[in-house]
Image (cartoon, rainbow, N blue to C red):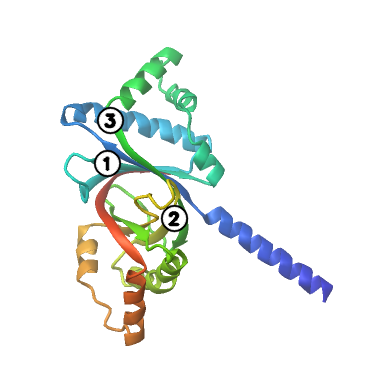
Amino acid sequence: MKKIVITCVLFFGLLLAVQAQQQRFMVFEFIKVESNQAYDFMEFKEFMEKVYQAAINDKRITGWDLWSLQSGAESGEFQYITITYYKDPVSMMNGLEEEDLVKYAMIHPHLNDGQARKKFSDALNSRDLAQRVYMKEIATTSDSFQFKKGTLASFDLMKAVEGKFEEYEKAEREVFQPIHQNRIEKGLMGSWSLLRTALPFGSEAKSTHLTMNIYKDYVQFFNAQEYEDMESTKEQQMAIEKGLKSRDQKWVYLATLENSIR
């Protein structure tokens, strides 16, 4: 009996460890680029792709995405969204310091310390950081979707109704996640995940959660918009309505993936 108990404890401990390893921590940066800086930003993009690839190789981050905004923001607010992926909350909050980025920039042939700093400084000056948000993934669908250039995403910013924080997350997991999983299995969606805001937080925060709705292209996206689940019961419809009332959908950003580094 004692051996069985020990075995069960070890099993559940291993299960929790695996789940912890699978969690993703992400930093979203909303970037504004003036029209007269468009060419410089393209150079920034190519330069930073190499820098972040070096950071991945050094196991400081697990990935980096660059998304170009198609709709959602007010004109001139921002045009790009970057996502930097981390393996745990500590590395996410520590982030990458300027010294780290300069070190990784020196992977370019013939760049010494001073030249790397100058190139890095010029790259940063080509854009304005409109907002930075730290997030933790708390739910995701079961899928094998591979991110590649042209992938489409709907970033839905949510704010849980005051006093209904847990109710909202429960609704996402128990009501909406199965709906998205069903769409994935029908070929109408690529992937879905729910993220909780780590920083900024508090009653004045613009949003508390974000959902990432991923589609392989516009064809799949529009097919998903037209799809209606005819199999849903009256009880399921009531659960959906209740879930919708637990949050305020603040904004929806539609974006196309320019590059994904893993």
Q: Callout 3, which amino acid?
A: Arg
- Identify the residue position indicated by label 2 in the image: 196
Q: Nearer the viewer, mark 2 or mark 3?
A: 2
Q: Residue 18: image x %, image y %?
A: 59, 58
Q: Are marks 2 and 1 in contact (CB under 8 Å)?
A: no
Q: Residue at x 49, y 24 (%)?
A: 99
Q: Are marks 1 and 3 in contact (CB under 8 Å)?
A: yes
Q: Residue at x 37, y 68 (%)?
A: 246
Q: Nearer the viewer, mark 2 or mark 1?
A: 2
SS class, disc 3 = loop
Residue 72 drawn above or below residue 4: above
Which image quarter: residue 31? top left
Q: Which mark is residue 127?
A: 3
Q: Mark 1 vs mark 3: which is more N-terminal?
A: 1
Residue 50 drawn above or below residue 9: above
Residue 151 drawn above or below residue 168: above
Which image quarter: residue 115? top left
Of residues 219 and 125, the one drawn nearer to the viewer in this rendering: 125
- Identify the residue position indicated by label 1 in the image: 80
